Image: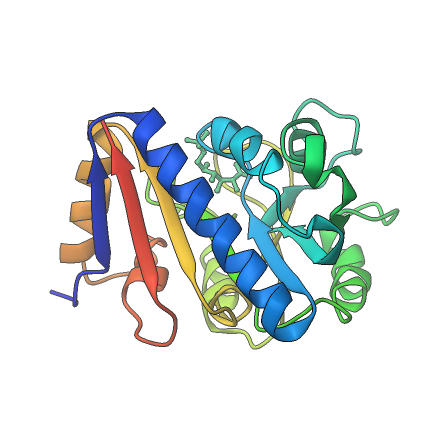
Amino acid sequence: MIKESVFKSFDNKAALETQLADRIANQLQEAVDARGKASLVVSGGSTPLKLFELLSKKAIDWNDVYITLADERWVDNDHSDSNERLVRNNLLQNRAASAKFCGLKNMYSSPYEGQIMTTEQLTHFPKPFDVVVLGMGNDGHTCSWFPCADAKELEHALTSDDLCVAVTPGNAPHARISLSKAGILASRQIYLHIVGEQKLDVYRQALADNDSSEMPIRAVLDQHKTPVDVYWSA
Ligand SMILES: O=C(O)[C@H](O)[C@@H](O)[C@H](O)[C@H](O)COP(=O)(O)O
């Protein structure tokens, strides 16, 4: 059994989103005040959409905030499955429109060919990342670390020192590029944002499980390098 992360439960999604948006905004502003700039890594999916909207309206120095993705489907940025498109439409709006966004997709035909360029594009990013927001699938994946992906690719994502890795999920569309475990843990604060009873069960299984290949979220939970706060609501 691993040391449980900080777990905060909320009566409803709105209460969670309000508090998490406030906390992230404060941490980003503190980073700008202390170091002149801040970095934020966000995930795709449906869970963070309202959080992104609330964040986008926060009165912080967004022009000093650098934003990138935890992972990206290797599709054009106008594709409906693009995480960059989702972030541009939901987070890079309102006051946050002035943030400096760097996506993970480039002109190479696959993430396997494009990952070096992606890594180079993130070289100038403020590191360690100040805030990382992760989601989780019902299969225990996070980022694009899928339990059903090729075992070698998943192991590489969880053991490589590279910032980015290319992954072909077993049962999710599109080849993807993802930050590696090393990349995600090179941060000051990780939030795991999950909603619903099923994901609560998955989270609890991950705490009890002893194999990250079965529950990749465990790679984030079973470590003591970077603080992980889990925000959950029904
Ligand atoms: O590219 C992605 O899809 C995300 O990075 C992925 O890791 C997401 O966070 C989970 O799949 C949860 O997605 P939901 O919030 O839609 O459940």
Return the residue found at the far top: 80
Residue 122, picture quadrant: bottom right
Side (left or right) of 23 relative to 81: left
> Image quadrant for the N terminus?
bottom left
Residue at 77% x, 47% y is: 105
Instruction: From this view, report whether residue 157 is shown above or below residue 93.
Output: below
Q: Where residue 115 appears, x then y in whole percent?
A: 74, 60
Residue at 48% x, 50% y is: 24
Residue at 78% x, 43% y is: 98
Given residues 140 and 187, the one toward you in this image is: 187
Residue 87, picture quadrant: top right
> Image quadrant for the C terminus?
top left
Instruction: From this view, report whether residue 80 is shown above or below residue 171.
Output: above
Q: Where residue 184 appears, x then y in whole percent?
A: 51, 63
Q: Where residue 83 appears, x then y in whole percent?
A: 65, 36
Given residues 147 and 37, the one toward you in this image is: 37
Residue 138 seen in this snapshot: no
Given residues 164 and 11, the one toward you in this image is: 11
Residue 21 seen in this snapshot: yes
Instruction: From this view, report whether residue 202 is shown above or below residue 27.
Output: above
How many numbered marks are there?
A: 0
Residue at 83% x, 45% y is: 109
Instruction: From this view, report whether residue 169 is shown above or below residue 7.
Output: above
